[in-house]
Image (cartoon, rainbow, N blue to C red):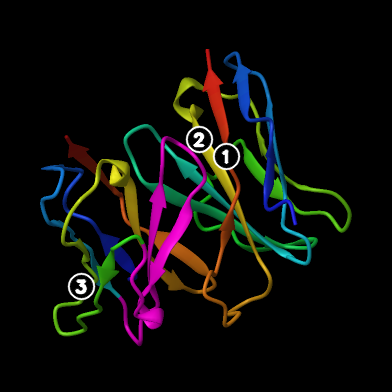
């Protein structure tokens, strides 16, 4: 099991461009979470998705940000018209099912570092 | 509202000194609490979970419901313990993280 895979590892965009961040959950996991880590700050929850459904998007900015987790393929976090303040590390995590009685609730990817010039 | 507070942004100690990373939480109900560690911007790794009552890499954490705390402790810090440490609360099927404490262990 390769674990949670995120790509790209680093992404550079100019202001106004679009950023697409991909996350492939662990095999057998159908729940995906996105977190954002701003410089010198902790991880902030953004969105929680199951296959084809957004379960909790309470942490998503109201504009320019969207997320999907299609039936086939990875989960995508999309940021339109990026601004310098979007520069951050974006981490994806996956879990097997809700409230699973496992020692480790969420398994994290290595993150995508987004830099907006 | 559910919240996790880590009051210290940076904790600097000398090798061999005791370490205590503070974590307080706000949660109605029986909390599930975790400590995660992040080395050099790598992926987060689970360090320990309060239910397990285990010791990982010499670290322990005890849940104190009266003080709503879950402090992480180690009696003798090692240089390789230098990392970011995050306390997290499992709530509504997601982890809520504190802002993290950077532990710096100096030789």
Residue range in magenta is B27-56
Question: Mark 2 — residue?
Answer: A89
Q: Tell me: B31 left or right of A115.
A: left
Query: Mark 2 belongs to which subunit?
Result: A
Report if the CB atoms under discs 3 and 1 are less than 8 Å apart: no
Q: Is residue B29 left or right of residue A64?
A: left
| Residue in the picture at 52% in, 75% down | A103
Label 3: how many Cα within 10 Å (few below 14, some 14–19, many 20+): some
Mark-to-mark CA distance, 3 and 2:
28 Å
Disc 2 to disc 1: CB gap under 8 Å: yes
Q: Is residue B40 a member of the stretch shown in magenta?
A: yes
Query: Residue shown at 44%/71% (left/top)?
Result: B90
Sooner in the amino-acid sequence: mark 2 or mark 1 = 2
Q: Find disc 1 in the rendering and name its residue.
A: A111
Taking depth in this image into account, of A90 and A70 the one nearest to the observer is: A90
Residue drawn at x 83%, y 54% as measured from the top left? A70
Category of crowding for the residue at label 1, using alpha-carbon neighbours closer than 10 angstroms: few (below 14), some (14–19), many (at least 20) = many
Q: Chain ID for label 1?
A: A
Image coordinates of residue B6 in percent, x first then y, are 22, 56
Q: Return the chain for callout 3.
A: B
């Amino acid at each position: 099991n390769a674990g949670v895979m995120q790509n790209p590892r680093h992404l550079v965009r100019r202001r106004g461009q679009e950023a697409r961040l991909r996350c492939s959950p662990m095999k057998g996991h159908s729940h995906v979470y996105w977190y954002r880590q701003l410089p010198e700050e902790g991880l902030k929850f953004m969105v929680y998705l199951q296959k084809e459904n957004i379960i909790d998007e309470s942490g998503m900015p109201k504009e320019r940000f969207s997320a999907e987790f299609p039936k086939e393929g990875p989960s995508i976090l999309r940021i339109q018209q990026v601004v310098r303040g979007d520069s951050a590390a974006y981490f994806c995590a996956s879990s097997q099912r809700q409230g699973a009685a496992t020692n480790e609730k969420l398994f994290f990817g290595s993150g995508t570092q987004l830099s907006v010039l | 509202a559910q919240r996790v507070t880590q009051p210290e942004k940076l904790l600097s100690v000398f090798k061999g000194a005791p370490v205590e990373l503070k974590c307080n939480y706000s949660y109605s109900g029986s909390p599930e609490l975790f400590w995660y560690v992040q080395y050099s911007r790598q992926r987060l790794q689970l360090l320990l979970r309060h239910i397990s009552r285990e010791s990982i890499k010499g670290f322990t954490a005890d849940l104190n419901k009266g003080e709503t705390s879950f402090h992480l402790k180690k009696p003798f810090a090692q240089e390789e313990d230098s990392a970011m440490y995050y306390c997290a609360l499992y709530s509504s099927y997601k982890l809520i993280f504190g802002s993290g404490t950077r532990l710096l262990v100096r030789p």
